[in-house]
Image (tube, rainbow, N blue to C red):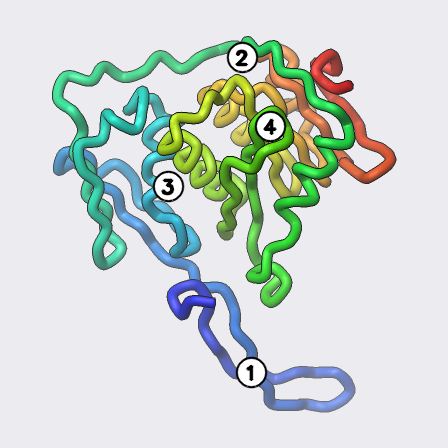
Amino acid sequence: MEDKILKKISYTRVDGELTPADERIIREAALTVFVDGNHFVTAMIMAAREKEFVVGHLYIQGFINKAADIVSLEIENSIAQVKLRPGIEKRDLSKTVTSGLKVGSKDVFECVSAILTSPVFSETEAVHSAGLFLDGKETVAVAEDLGRHNALDKVIGAALLENADFSKLVAASTGRQPTEMILKCRSAGIPVVATKGVPTSLAVELAEESGITIVGKVRRNSMIVYSHPERIE
């Protein structure tokens, strides 16, 4: 595992006695993004797949319509310099997701299982994972980060770089699903969100209004569909 992701520290274990020990823990890094010379955002992320994070974040915020709208993207010393194609109009963020996608419950389980095999999580128990899967079967991208929202930005950016059709994708994510996660999926046009955890009540209301299917408490033999169950077979 790369040094920029993990850092070795010393600590004292307390389990009836005091024992010196050491282990590797996750690094938290500040990534500052400039767009056409103007400060866009400073985000605290795990320093991996930074390019995908920047692309995904720009897309979710409506600053680009496709990856080709980015003329150049250079990242050095935790600073990302982005130059956009001249004359781009900010994308209107969709309020609804339209998709004919239907996914089998077995495939939903496989999507969620695919993001739970992180070696970084196994060592540190300190990251969230997200993944996008074409028709709920083919892996488009999987990424990790300190925050579930950053991990989702990363896989959305990766999918955009691959010119993926978001209306045919299933998003899998760890942990609870608050409104911010559903807003990101709505902005990208992703119709199905699946998690081993649960959504918040406002996330369910937003998903219902937006045409998004939320599947929670995903297990091999059971799961709960909180909104738009017609997409799950």
* Residue marked by disc 4: 170
* Residue marked by disc 3: 52
Disc 3 and disc 2: Cα gap in Å? 23 Å
> Does 99 sit left or right of 162 as displayed?
right
Mark yes or no: residue 168 visible: yes
Mark 2 closeness class: few <14, some 14–19, many ≥20 residues within 10 Å: many
Q: Which secondary structure, mark 2?
A: loop
- Residue 215, quarter of the rendered image: top right
Q: Earlier in the sequence, mark 2 or mark 1?
A: 1
Is 14 located above or below residue 205 in the figure? Answer: below
Mark seen at residue 97: 2
**Most extreme residue toward the front, as rendered?**
138
Disc 2 and disc 1: Cα gap in Å? 48 Å
Kindly indicate whether the residue at mark 2 contacts the one at mark 3 (C-beta within 8 angstroms). Answer: no
What amino acid is at disc 2? Val
Disc 2 and disc 4: Cα gap in Å? 13 Å
